[in-house]
Image (spheres, helix red, strand yellow):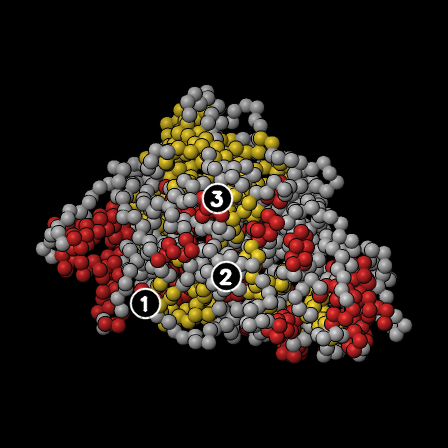
Amino acid sequence: MKLSRQFTVFGSAIFCVVIFSLYLMLDRGHLDYPKSPRREGSFPQGQLSMLQEKIDHLERLLAENNEIISNIRDSVINLSESVEDGTKNSKGNFSHGAGSPLLPAKRPPLAVDPGDCLFASQSGSHSPDVQMLDVYSLIPFDNPDGGVWKQGFDITYKPDEWDTKPLQVFVVPHSHNDPGWLKTFDDYFREKTQYIFNNMVVKLKEDPRRKFIWSEISYLSKWWETIDVQKKDAVKSLLESGQFEIVTGGWVMPDEAGAHYSAIIDQLIEGHQWLERNLGVKPRSGWAIDPFGHSPTMAYLLKRAGFSHMLIQRVHYAVKKHFALHKTLEFFWRQNWDLGSATDIFCHMMPFYSYDIPHTCGPDPKICCQFDFKRLPGGRYGCPWGVPPETIYPGNLQNRAEMLLDQYRKKSKLFRTTVVLAPLGDDFRYTERTEWDHQFKNYQLLFDYMNSHPQYNVKIQFGTLSDYFDALEKEASANSRNSQSIFPVLSGDFFTYADRDDHYWSGYFTSRPFYKRMDRTLESHLRAAEILYYFALKQAKQYKISKFLSSSHYVMLTEARRNLGLFQHHDAITGTAKDWVVVDYGTRLFHSLMNLKKVIGHSALLLILKDKHLYDSYSSDTFLEMDLKQRTQSSLPQKHVISLSAEPRYLVVYNPLEQARSSVVSICVSSPAAQVSSASGEPVEIQMSAVWDTANTASQTVYEISFLAEMPPLGLKVYKILETSSSSPHLAKYDLYNGNIANEGIFNMNSMKSAQEAITLENPFIRLRFGQSGLLEEMINKGDGKSLEVKVQFSWYGTTSKKDKSGAYLFLPDGEAKPYVYTTPPFVRVQRGRFYSDVTCFFEHVTHRVRLYNIHGVEGQSVEISNIVDIRKEHNYEIAMRISSGINSQNRFYTDLNGYQIQPRVTMSKLPLQANVYPMTTMAYIQDAERRLTLLSAQSLGVSSLKSGQIEVIMDRRLMQDDNRGLEQGVHDNKITANLFRILLEKRSVNMEEDQKAVSYPSLLSHITSSFLNHPVFPMTEKAPVPTLQLLGGFSPLMSPLPCDIHLVNLRTMQSKVDGKHSSEAALILHRKGFDCRFSSRDTGLLCSTTQGKILVQKLFSKFTVVSIIPSSLSLMHSPPDARNISEINLSPMEISAFRIHLR
């Protein structure tokens, strides 16, 4: 306080000095991001380090108490205003906000650089040749019988079409290996995949004209560990000769609906780094033949990783037909938001039903199947069309060659060049040597025959994917008129996929939601562990802490990356594998979760130890224990109960976000006489809440305490916790409806028969009104007093009575959802407390909690919704949560793609209900001219908006039958599943024509709320009190928060090239988010500004020196030609960039 008072009292006399020193503080401290940063060069190093120490000390003082920060801020603003206005003085503002010490004084509105608002307003003004939203409105979706190509049309050609330019055909042998589906990853490897590799080495060597492509590095790396040097050298020589090509080269071929972009990048890096270390190859073509629908996010990430071409397959059959008619199956895929063409990547869409051989040589599967020589008579497979293949011999050579060429020619008529791609493979193909012989020998005879007869005008050969794209590029550039490409530009996405009839693959957006939630938990733990580990590694090197340097932490990190990577596979996160395979994935995720908790605990300990050399004596066991404990791979995490004593123990809180953060931290303790204090011993206000053994039985031995923690960006904050008779927590108060309470204990509990009047909750921003069943009915914005109907309800979907029913992949409902009916009113528990209040209602299948945080920060702006869902007794039902509002959204709504970008959606009456369900990775919203209602999600699920003003999310599904897509089982391994959401209601002012654009952006508040939801704080406690232990008050690695719109995706320690251990470099991955400025930024609780994407490197870290930071491609495969050490990072809106960074 003294500091602030001196500023204000003596402001006029010494304002020059004050302004200068404040300028330095702001430059160095973590208050506001500098608009025009100073240059480092003008200070000698010694003075700088002294200044740095003082500033670190100041930072610690400031972080102690939010009020002081607020008051200094107000004083700074008043002083700077007085300087600008030429007035001589201006008094400091010591207002306490809403008159409560827990609510910091109102902060200045978020500072957004006006230039940062241009991007969202300009976006969507450039129209591509093909916009997917328009395609959907054009297509009739009438599904007529197309003849031999059932979903297409008859293709004809004239025999002389290739007289001037011969047809060029590339037959590309491949084998699609799912890392887990009907068998586990290890079982597939043992029974199938290893033999494919072993035979490849032998069989490709037999003839240099043979080719083969491979994509999943998870399998390749496993095989590599088992083979000798001769085989390794053979693989390297096949790669060098171009006979063998790695396509995409990620750890897996990821799902593109439920996977978060950060996890997709991570598995891409894992694969590409493995390739660089072991094979020295850099993939250049993308190959995604099996994900169930395709996202432009994947196109963007491949482009940023240095790819120039990609291929996709599973696209709605009506879209394929439309594209085939217009010859737009090959296109430049451009991001919706791109104002130029920087994101363009060339994409080939396979035209027919499947990636198997019957559907890849041409339009007639009956004929193509006869050229799959694994299906020769006498084998295990036949052709479902009734005509088997024939071994090629001189007597049938001409006839067979002409049959096959006819298919290739017809296929070529769907494209704009004379270069044809004919993939040759299927699931787990080429396991046996006989198949290698049958396919390669028979095809070579056909090739030799066609190539030796000029009248056919064809040049045909085995090729890799890049052979095809290179030949295509060569021809296209010869054909292009005045540098105008012959290929169209397309923007948009390819969801929701249907492979036939009304069989839409929208079921898997929700299937096995327990593991979709666990995936996100592991992602947040992995990112937190990566960042803390790299910082701790630097300090361990500086202080020569050999125990940390020689620990298995890096091995655990690598294993966690690979287990998370494996789960991004398109039969894993999708929930479309066999029950025991799901258990195998879950066990891997669970195992890595346990290990990451150790890495986080050990890294945090090292960073906050006063004497780093004591690390060895404290780190034998997990010294800092994480707050949440999960017993098995299939159970929900439970809060760990801390046994208190009079001896204080440390409580360390980690903020994994790049923003300073005021968040409520809740922990469970053994005594109601708990006290929390800051590291320096100042008591902190706490709310004490009951912990419930059952819905109406409060525990007499466990209590929850909550307090407001102020944490630096990416930093640690240290508190102490103990049992003392002088503790004075704010006890929460309870109202209970429709049931009796078993015991009150220390709390004031008020039992009522039923809710006669509406139940309400409120905080400084929002008032909520609930109905008698405890369900939300209305939200009131306290700023302007305006109310909006926001009703939460539950509903059931059944499955159709037709032959084909819903399963793991497909959603085939029996009509609209039926309301969730309950005969007796549910038990409702209302809690009102100092930091948060909530309403919990107990239904048979859902425990539904709505919580409002009573704080001025970001988390006070939105409403938290938690559902514990249990449908284990149901048969063929899916449970949904529907939010109905007064927003006039008509038939438009918005969903995110992979947590990276927003895709506008139109609910179409010409499509069946299940076609209007889309994937939601992190958010969905509806809006009208005045308001936007956003549902933010902590897990991927299917979402729709079937009526104006509605958002509906499917939370779990239990289905008793297979849906005939190969899984051969239903989905009945349901778990008790936790779903977590936030509802954010924002005012906007915009004309509705704006909303017809093909692009949309969340607000900054929405982005940060999503980050808070997906990256919760990590509380850790000292396992047992150690009186001699001395910790620092915290750890604050950044000089200031990153700009509001820049997210640190990862700080990933790189593997050394030699021994598989850590190197001194890390991959710094940053994402600058696009945001819409047309929302009020007043009182949003955001403590950051935006800087037009600029970050000064020397202003980044406070505890470390940046030795070098060099731009790189996204997966670190390529360095730009002018790669050099940079002093300023510049990111465009939406850009994700990677840098090789070396700290010390």
Q: Which is more toward the observer, 109 or 57?
A: 109
Picture quadrant of residue 130: bottom right
Task: Give the left or right position of residue 886, taking residue 1126 as reference.
Answer: right
Residue pointed to by mark 1: 1098
Label 3 secondary element:
strand
Q: Which disc number belongs to residue 246?
A: none
* Viewer-nearest of discs 3 and 1: 3
Badge 3: residue crowd in 10 Å (few <14, some 14–19, many ≥20): many
Residue 1013 visible to an observer of this rendering:
yes
Q: Which is more toward the observer, 557 or 241?
A: 241
Sequence order check, earlier mark of 2 and 3 = 2
Q: Looking at the image, which residue is at 42% across and 37% down?
A: 851
Q: Residue 646 placed where, x, y %?
A: 32, 43
Q: Which disc number belongs to residue 557?
A: 2
Which amino acid type is shown beneath numbered disc 2?
Answer: Leu
Which amino acid type is shown beneath numbered disc 1?
Answer: Gln
Label 2 secondary element:
helix
Label 1 secondary element:
helix
Is the C-beta separation of discs 1 and 2 under 8 Å? no
Sequence order check, earlier mark of 1 and 2 = 2
Badge 2: residue crowd in 10 Å (few <14, some 14–19, many ≥20): many
Which amino acid type is shown beneath numbered disc 3?
Answer: Tyr
Q: Looking at the image, which residue is at 74% across and 70% down?
A: 161
Image position of 969 with respect to 544: above or below: above
Residue 957 visible to an observer of this rendering:
no
Q: Residue 532 placed where, x, y %?
A: 41, 59
How far apart, in angstroms, are the residues tagged by discs 2 and 3? 35 Å
Q: Which is more toward the observer, 565 or 158?
A: 158
